[in-house]
Amino acid sequence: ELAEYLFNNSNASIRDIARLSENRLEMDRSYFVTLVESEEESADINMQLVRSYLYECLKKDKFEAIPLTWSNTLAMVIPVCSNRDSFDEPLSWPAMIRYKAVLEKKFSLSLAQGGGRVYPLDELRKSFYEARIALTLPRLLNEHHYVQKFSDLGIYYPIFCQSPQDIKS
């Protein structure tokens, strides 16, 4: 249900999804989303298998994250400490980069990763959209094998921080 909510812009309520998530999502916590995609266009890549492997690694390391797959994209919803400001740097970002390297080595993949900023759960889609922008923009600029945070987009950051309505006008 959470993957459908993020990737398909479902009308479901994030509060209902949180209630059904067996305590994996908490309304009083903040989260960020990071998206990982394979740079190879291959039918041989089983992202469900990659997600399962990642989930076991996260569980073994007692790292709290919710991995999701959609088509050839692996999304991770990552909680941050509940007492942190919603715009603070997540403590777990370096760990996410290490997990990307583990996946690349294990599955012989070249991966690109984009990360959104931290938001309360009811604004999780903002982080997802930011992660999508951070994943897509470097690819459009012909970059490969990158890790891009939305907040580090340089001159593009102020543009994409605006609402789509403000950008159009």
Image (cartoon, helix red, strand yellow):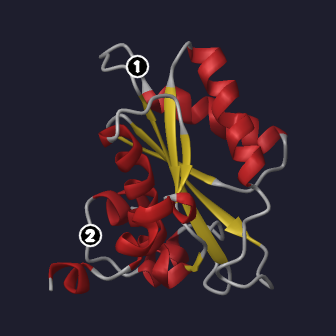
**Tag 2–tag 1 contact (CB < 8 Å):** no
Q: Which mark is residue 3?
A: none
Asked whether, in this view, residue 167 is left or right of residue 53, the answer is left
Judge left or right: residue 47 versus residue 29.
left
Relative image position of residue 22 (x, y in whole percent): 61, 67
Q: Would you identify the image quadrant in which residue 45 lies?
A: top left
Q: Tell me what residue is drawn at x 68 percent, y 80 percent.
A: 29
Point 52% across, 18% down: residue = 109
For label 1, the SS is: loop
Neighbor class of circle 2 (other Cα within 10 Å; few <14, some 14-19, many 20+) is few
- What percent of the width, then of the height, locates residue 5? 35, 66
Near-viewer residue (149 or 45):
149
Tell me which numbered mark, 2 or 1, is placed earlier along the sequence. Answer: 2
- Residue 59 placement: quadrant: top right
Secondary structure of the residue carrying numbered label 2: loop
Determine the CA span between mark 2 and mark 1. 26 Å
User: Left of 125 or right of it: where is 149?
Assistant: right
Compared to 72, does 2 lie above or below? below
Where is the N terminus found, in terms of image quarters?
bottom left
Mark 2 residue type: Ser
Q: Where in the figure is residue 75, as x and y percent of width and height?
A: 49, 49
Q: How many dots with numbers?
A: 2
Quadrant in the rendering for residue 39? top left
Q: What is the residue that sits farthest to the front in this orientation? A: 155
In what quadrant of the picture does the C terminus appear?
Answer: bottom left
Q: Which residue is mark 2?
A: 10
**What residue occupies the far left of the structure in this picture?**
169
Which mark is on residue 45?
A: 1
